[in-house]
Image (cartoon, grey):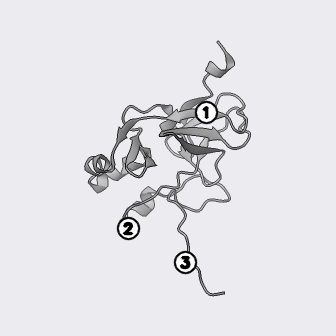
Amino acid sequence: MRRRDRKLFEVRPSPVHGFGGFALRRIRPGTRIVEYVGERLTGDEVDARYADEEAERWRTFLFRVSDDAYIDASRQGNDSRFINHSCDPNCESDVIDGHIYITAIRDIPAGAELTYDYTLELEEEPLPSWEAHYACRCGSARCRGTMLEPRSEPAGDA
């Protein structure tokens, strides 16, 4: 088996949340680890599928590819859907030609949990229950307390 054909991570229970992806060997910065795959949906299909608040828990498997294209890893997804959020991640997501790749941004030792910053975007005002649902559990010193994208503060007078 060629080195590039070997699996880079495995899924197992995570101290961050549920299950996570853990490096099977050292992963160098710039390494493309996995493609994030799943069922491709339009915005209207997403709205129809996740119309009620109970369905919101699955929205963390949704990845926006473009203005009206999403990937829903809860259906037809691979192990990439188990890579957890962190406010101080060791990976990033890259959208390239309609595909999403998870890439290492720093050296990741064998056994380390793979993470990237979800920076989830909400298209509507969040319901009060969403604060707990989208709470961050990464535990990093840089934790901002949420998986949601950082809110930009309005420019104030100095």
Residue 19 higher or lower than 122, as above or below: above
Q: Position of residue 142 (x, y in %)?
A: 66, 59
- Give the residue at mark 2: 125
**Mark closest to the chain's N terminus, 3 or 2:** 2
Q: Out of 90 and 112, give the one closest to the viewer.
A: 90
- How many discs appear? 3
Q: Position of residue 77 (x, y in %)?
A: 42, 33
> What type is the residue that disc 2 sits on?
Glu
Number of other residues with Cα within 10 Å of mark 1, as a class: few under 14, some 14 to 19, many 20 or more: some
> What type is the residue that disc 1 sits on?
Ile
Residue 154 found in image quarter: bottom right
- Give the residue at mark 1: 33
How far apart marks 1 and 2 lie (CA) works out to 34 Å
Residue sitting at x 44%, y 49% = 66
**Mark closest to the chain's N terminus, 1 or 3:** 1
Q: Position of residue 149 (x, y in %)?
A: 52, 60
- Give the residue at mark 3: 154
Residue 158 found in image quarter: bottom right
Q: Position of residue 107 (x, y in %)?
A: 74, 39
Residue 144 found in image quarter: bottom right
